Image (cartoon, rainbow, N blue to C red):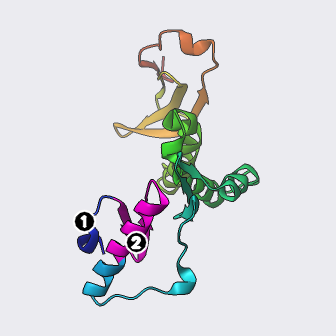
Amino acid sequence: MDQIFDDLSFVFCYIDDILISSSSPAEHEDHLRKVLQRLDEHGLVLNPRKCVLGVESIEFLGYRVDSKGITPLPERVAAIQEFPLPVTADKLARFLGMLNYYRRFVPKYAATLAPLNALLAAFEASKVELANAACLAHPKDDAPLALVTDASDIALGAVVQQCVNDVWEPLGFHSRKLSTTEKNYAPPALRVLILDPDS
């Protein structure tokens, strides 16, 4: 369809939908004649029941198009505004999909939606991390222990390990998110404290 009308700047096609934009009734009549002639030349026919002619605004592909520009359909906006609080990852993904369709209308869209996208990513990452969970060893009374701590810009982490046959085995992990105040501090460097039960 695009190839048929690629030289007509007033025509926009999407699959089998055709939008004709004109600045006056007379120009619209001329545009219609050219489009109908082009369709006839290629042996294509229209369904009259689906044709809307000579209107000042029209709904097209989920948008309202008129002489002022393009806006989201009010009912689509209402559906987004009335969407219930997502309580599952699938519902959050569905909500983000609804918003994404209209992203070009929203200033700072990426920044506004970053926390929700991060939440969805964290949800998926947590499932992967649990599936690949480390095996925690049984503590041995005579094994040297080590407490290894580290930090990033957003969290603190630590692991207690024991050394058995020159191999460090994890006994347990701990981590927590930094508070808003703590995020202003420089993160501490990696630290290792080794405790020898014989000492």
SS assignment at label 1: loop
Say what amino acid the circle numbered 1 marks. Answer: Asp
Specify start and end residues of the magenta stretch as a single range. Answer: 10-35
Task: Give the numbered dot on residue 30.
Answer: none
Q: Nearer the viewer, residue 59 or 34?
A: 34
Instruction: From the viewer's side, name the closer residue of 135 and 64.
Output: 64
Crowding at dot 1, Cα within 10 Å, few <14 / some 14-19 / many 20+, comes out as few
Residues at marks 1 and 2, CA–CA distance in whole angstroms: 15 Å
Among numbered discs 1 and 2, the one appearing first in the sequence: 1
Q: Work out whether residue 188 can be spotted.
A: yes
Residue 62 in view in this figure: no
> Would you say 86 lies left or right of 195 here?
right
> Front-most of 157 and 64?
64
Horizontal and vertical percent position of residue 66: 54, 53
Q: Residue at x 24, y 65 (%)?
A: 6
Mark 2 neighbour density, 10 Å: few (under 14) some (14–19) many (20 or more)? some
Q: SS of the residue at dot 2?
A: helix
Circles 1, 2 touching at the beta carbon (< 8 Å):
no
Residue 52 is inside the magenta segment: no
Residue beneath disc 1: 6
